[in-house]
Image (cartoon, rainbow, N blue to C red):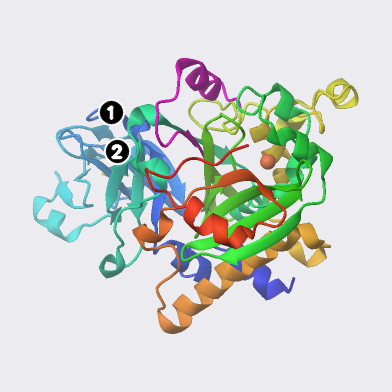
Amino acid sequence: MQPEMQELLVRTGPGTPMGELMRRYWIPALLSREIADPDCPPIRVKLLGERLLALRDSNGRAGIIGEFCAHRGTSLFFGRNEECGIRCSYHGWKYDLDGNCIDLPQQPSYAPEIKLTAYPCVEQGGVVWVYMGPPARRPEPPALEWSLLPDTHAYVSRRWQECNWMQALEGAIDSSHVSFVHRYEMDFDPMHDTAAGRKYLKADPSPIFDVRQSDAGLTILTRRNGDADTYYWRITQFIMPWYTFIPPFGDHALGAHAFVPMDDENCWTWNINYYADKPLDEVQLKAMKDGKGIHGQVLSGTLRAVANRDNDYLIDRAGQKDRRSFSGVIGFAIQDSSLQESMGPIQDRTQEHLVPTDRAIVVARNRLADAARALRESQAEPPGVRADDQRLRAGSTLLGRDRPIEQWYRDALAARPDNPIYTV
Ligand code: FES
Ligand SMILES: [Fe+2]
């Protein structure tokens, strides 16, 4: 990779091409339950290099504003959230969710001139979404299937991941790693065990990738040998700029992610499990809350993983030897983040050596880079901004070797209520 391409992909602060691209989409900022009640404590949220504060006002409205007081720069995290605004604890200046200074005790006539950054929010699917782009280009709220379901059907978590967002995204569109790092975990994890697909994943470590453009991003078709005259297909959806839908495992809930830059060396990894047509049961919810499957166990407050780089992700070398875990790290979520973080905060892609199973990664990088350049050069509307284009699903299936996959997947993987879930 050329250094210019690397810079284009990994830099997301204000004014960068990728940062401007990302600011054209609704951004998952935090969980609604993190600011559950009116006037509850605010939450710091860093997004695309901007330090922001999320809070819920006395009327129950959620909002996101700049973190620092306009007076002398105190963090409003230490402020008082009361009577429809947050009051700085230092000298009492008070701001509403639109960033207006609504009280300035020392010089009231000055208040109308004072404005904090404030971004519009919507709440949907248990998530507070924020739009940080030009007001005139604000899209309709997202239509990702998991974000439109009743609360009972989906469980969403988020986790601080200590590496650049592209390392996390690239992991999620790389089906070939499942045959290695998750090889034994598939048999232990309560959200993956029992799936027939495990057999094909283990037997064929070198899948064939076929990557197709969708209106919203990419559909990544991964082919392994199935039984007799079938192929085992795992079909991942990549929705611009950071969403992935994971091909499902047997009767387990569907999975999805988002990888949102916090800054260029850290990201928020969002994890979602859902059924499109029924509630999750208590056993599943407990497993997710305990960090099983794609969620991971985190420390409250920082949302940093309990198994993190300071403790070598609690690697169990005996477990690595006796095949409890391929890498010795326990759990899908931390297996992924440990290896992605081990590359360093920003992987140096000028030094990598790619092989055919990295095909989806190459195509995704180009799709993102092309969209960022097109936005900068011609203000072209980025792919995946339109809500209707996001109505897709992942799938896994066994198909006869003579069945053309392209005739099958376009209809089968539309996120329509009357479409069955395809899962093996
Ligand atoms: S620094 Fe906030 S009111 Fe003075
Ligand atoms: Fe993984």
Residue at the extreme bottom of the image, as rendered: 378
Q: Looking at the picture, how far across and down is residue 346, in whole percent?
A: 68, 55
Secondary element at image label 1: loop
Secondary structure beneath dot 2 equals strand
Relative placement, left or right, of 134 versus 280 is left
Q: Residue 40 carries which label?
A: 1
Give the farthest residue toward the right: 321
CB within 8 Å, label 1 to label 2: yes
- Image x and y of residue 328, in percent: 81, 28
| Residue denoted by label 2 | 55
Looking at the rendered structure, the kind of residue marked 1 is Cys
Using the image, determine if residue 215 lies above or below residue 82: below
Q: Does the magenta stretch include residue 159?
A: no
- Look at the image and tell me in which quarter the N terminus lies: bottom right
- Badge 1 density bin: few <14, some 14–19, many ≥20, Cα 10 Å: some
Q: Which of 101/48 is in front?
A: 48
Q: Which residue is drawn at 15% across and 35% down?
A: 59
Q: Mark 2 is on which residue type?
A: Leu
Query: What span is colored magenta in the figure?
Result: 269-292
Q: In the rendered image, is residue 147 in sight?
A: yes
Image point 17% across, 33% down: which residue? 58
